[in-house]
Amino acid sequence: MSAQNSAGIQTLLDAEREASKIVQKAREYRTKKVREARDEAKNEIEAYRAKKEAEFKKFEAEHTQGNKAAQDEADKEAEAKIREIKAAGKKSQGKVADDLLDAVFRVNPVPPV
């Protein structure tokens, strides 16, 4: 009977070792699958980020060109106005200086009323 019990115990121990190996393989498989899923998710996120970055750069380029054209047009208009003002100043500067000197040197006192 004790040999039979010993053989039964040995069979149980062997089954336990085999079950332990199966559980370990399952854990390793699960860990491998989790890593693969994590790597796949990282790749998907990076691809999505790159796609959105490209879309943003395209959007930015399209709208920056419009702003740049508007800015160039505004700069041209401002330069034209500045030239116009300078020309008017040069044209009238002699008369303005004469009028100022005339006002300073010709004093017409007026008595208070």
Image: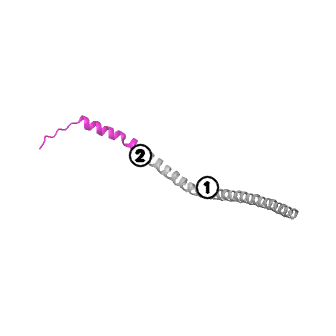
Determine the residue positioned at 82% across, 60% down. 13
Q: What residue type is labelled 2?
A: Ile
The part of the image, by quadrant, that contains residue 101 is top left
Q: Relative to 103, is 56 above or below?
A: below
Q: What element carries label 1?
A: helix
Q: Position of residue 87 (x, y in %)?
A: 42, 44
Q: Residues within 10 Å of mark 2 (few under 14, many from 20)?
A: few
Q: Where is residue 59 in the image (x, y as percent from the top left)?
A: 59, 58
Q: Marks 2 and 1, how far apart in space? A: 41 Å
Residue extending furthest toward the left: 113
Q: Name the residue under label 2.
A: 85
Q: Name the residue under label 1.
A: 57
The secondary structure making up most of the magenta span is helix
Frontmost residue, 37 versus 28 = 28
Tell me if 76 is positioned left or right of 53 in this view. left
Residue extending furthest toward the front: 1
Q: What stretch is highlighted in magenta?
A: 85-113
